[in-house]
Image: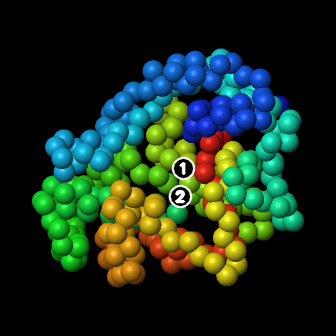
Amino acid sequence: MTLRSPSFLDLETLLSQAEYHDIDVPVAQDIVETTVSKRSGGGKAGLGAIALSGSAGSDFQFQSTYSLAPREKATVSKVIDGLIREKAVQVNPVGDSALSKDALIEIEGTARITAASVMSKVFFVFRRLMLARDINDLSELAHLDLEDADVAEGIQRVYLQNELLPLPMLLEVTGSSLPHKVYVNVRPDFFIDEASADRLEGDLRVLGSVSRLISSVQYRVTDEWLLHGWEFMMRRIMMAQIQDDLEEVTRQLQRLGLDVPDDDVHAYISGPAIVIDAIALY
């Protein structure tokens, strides 16, 4: 048992799991209120957060960070230890483990951000410009490129200035104990201190719940990451022609010197694979 220092923590979900499994913890509401009161509300210092005024941008939200005090780290570590001790969490399950939806697992491996999440930032920039310019025709996407000053500025803010965006991230974890592919869904609003994408890659442990089980004959579209924030029907229309759009986005990224591997996750996750909703990363 060790003191954990999470880079990402959904404390409310963690404490709800502890309460469900009868793990003795301090009153959950007190901890949640204390933590929430320390959220910055404006993103990381010096980086800024996204918020558009007016009705056109009303659905954009701040991505915020908050601090975790040393005593709270101890509480979090004890809660996780308690869940593991009560066998509520499967730790590094092996190939023949029976995984089920909503099961709690802890997986250790090497994480990296998928191409779907890298590309989602470009679609975010495009959507923001379509709202700002009151563009309603999807075909206009083809005319948005780096020659457009607004596009170039948006791309620079996102990729070079590390602008915080209200987008979930899809990670792939390799080198785990499971034989199939492991993906992790990371929500944008539970990073600790200065953590963000800068601490999402590399060796880490993931505590989370299984949200999707994808068999070897199935696949899962990635629109909830790739096109996050777009209206449902718009996403369906765009996913039907997504290959052309992704090729255009890939060209845009290559002009910035960013190489998107062909074998990475773009529009689909192919099985066998699982997707985990992250509760904590450490």
- Whole-angstrom CA distance, mark 1 to mark 2, is 6 Å
Image vertical order of residue 75 relative to residue 176, above or below = above
| Residue 108 drawn at (x, y percent) | 73, 51
Find residue 95 and name its label.
Answer: none
- The local crowd at label 2, few if under 14, some if 14 to 19, many if 20 or more residues have their Cα within 10 Å, is many
Indicate which disc, 1 or 2, sits on the residue closer to the N terminus. 2
Where does the N terminus fall, quadrant-wise? Answer: top right
User: Observer-nearest residue: 94 or 101?
Assistant: 101
| Residue 46 drawn at (x, y percent) | 33, 33
| Residue 42 drawn at (x, y percent) | 34, 32
Residue indicated by mark 1: 186
Image vertical order of residue 140 relative to residue 93, above or below = below
- The local crowd at label 1, few if under 14, some if 14 to 19, many if 20 or more residues have their Cα within 10 Å, is many
- Total count of labels: 2
Residue indicated by mark 2: 170
| Residue 106 drawn at (x, y percent) | 74, 47
In the drawing, does residue 10 fall left or right of residue 48?
A: right
> Is there CB contact under 8 Å for labels 1 and 2?
yes
In the drawing, does residue 3 fall left or right of residue 39?
A: right
Q: What residue type is labelled 2?
A: Leu
Residue under the point 32% across and 58% down: 124
Q: Which amino acid does label 1 sit on?
A: Val
Q: Quadrant of residue 93?
A: bottom right
Residue under the point 41% across and 51% down: 167
